[in-house]
Image (cartoon, helix red, strand yellow):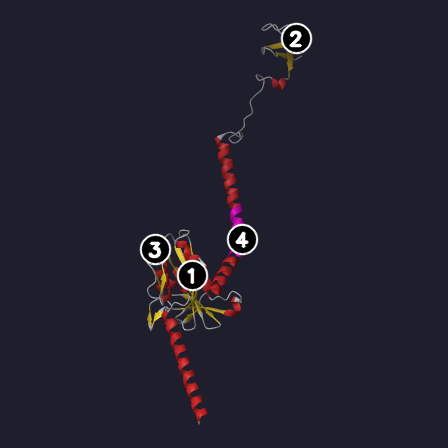
Amino acid sequence: MATKKFKCNVCGYIHEGDAAPAKCPVCGAPASEFTELKESADPASETPKKKGLFGDTNSNAYIVLYSTVMVVIVAVLLAVAALALKPRQDANDLNEKKRNILSSLSAEGESYDQFIDAYVVDKEGNRIDGNVFALLNDLPTAFAEGKYPIFEAKDGRVVIPVTGMGLWGPVWGYVALEKDMNTVSGIIMAHKGETPGLGAEIATAKYQSKFVGKTIFEGDQFVSVTLRKGGAKDPAHEVDAITGGTKTSDGVTAMLYNSLSNYLPLLEAKRAAAAGAEAAAGEVSNEENAVSHE
């Protein structure tokens, strides 16, 4: 018969026998202070279980594995969410571009699809195949490849996308021209990281209103619109530069000149056509007046 074991609760002495001793031989504690030990509670009789490499939740290996798994799971979830949201993000981006184009024309109440004819022209101003909004997603590359998206309103005005660099990053926008292909009807500009209160002013409606009525041609010569430090001296072609935002102002000046230059063949062709139509209308009017006098 197996011998029982009793542990003294006072000093920890282990007694083996059928019953606890009347008194602990070590500390003298009475039998009531002894507790019978179960077989599994005997540390000497147990064989420690092997936990394995990741069995100990406090081990470095377990922590590294757990962290890696969690990172992978989070990355997968984010990727799935991004893929699921991409169509909606693309739709929002497209709608924002359409709103900005209409805003440059002060035609927010119009339906973009019914009011705007969007197409792409080459360096000579001829229409070519191309997805205008796909090109807008990387306008600098589109310009470098000789592909120029343009938006023509039903009333004869046009909207030209522009892109350049400010002080801290890209600046971009849309310039609307009147039917004469010369007078600025409106402009929308945005930026990635210009200084608030300084260069970032280019994105405000108050500053953008300064461009309305400016002209980009001096006679037949293209001059664009310049942001001049110290105040505009030429009211036809200049706008006051942003106070404290010289670099941004210079960037906008370069953006307008370089971007609009790409469309000169198209603009000049439209200007010539408009002048021809106006001359023809004048001749008809003169003939009608001559007939009426007869």
Depth order, front residue of 237/262: 237
Is 117 part of what is drawn in magenta?
no
**Is 194 situated left or right of 21 in this image?**
left
Q: Are marks 1 and 4 in contact (CB under 8 Å)?
A: no
Task: Identify the residue position indicated by label 2 in the image.
Answer: 31
Is 82 part of what is drawn in magenta?
yes
Q: Amino acid at mark 1?
A: Gln
Q: Amino acid at mark 3?
A: Thr
Q: Secondary structure under badge 2? A: helix
Task: Identify the residue position indicated by label 3 in the image.
Answer: 246
Span highlighted in magenta in the image: 77-89
Q: Are marks 3 and 2 in contact (CB under 8 Å)?
A: no
Q: Amino acid at mark 4?
A: Leu
Q: Quadrant of the N terminus?
A: top right
* Label 2 packing within 10 angstroms: few (<14), some (14-19), many (20+): some
Residue at 42%, 61% (x, y): give it.
Answer: 208
Q: Secondary structure under badge 4? A: helix
> Mark 1 or mark 2: which comes first in sequence?
2
Q: CA distance from mark 1 to mark 2?
A: 97 Å
Q: CA distance from mark 4 to mark 2?
A: 74 Å
Task: Identify the residue position indicated by label 4 in the image.
Answer: 85
User: Could you say where residue 157 lies in the image, as x and y percent from the top left?
Assistant: 45, 71
Q: Secondary structure under badge 1? A: helix
Q: Which mark is residue 208?
A: 1
* Label 1 packing within 10 angstroms: few (<14), some (14-19), many (20+): some
User: Could you say where residue 115 lies in the image, as x and y percent from the top left?
Assistant: 51, 69
Q: CA distance from mark 1 to mark 4?
A: 33 Å
Q: Is residue 120 above or below residue 34?
A: below
**Is 17 situated left or right of 213 in this image?**
right
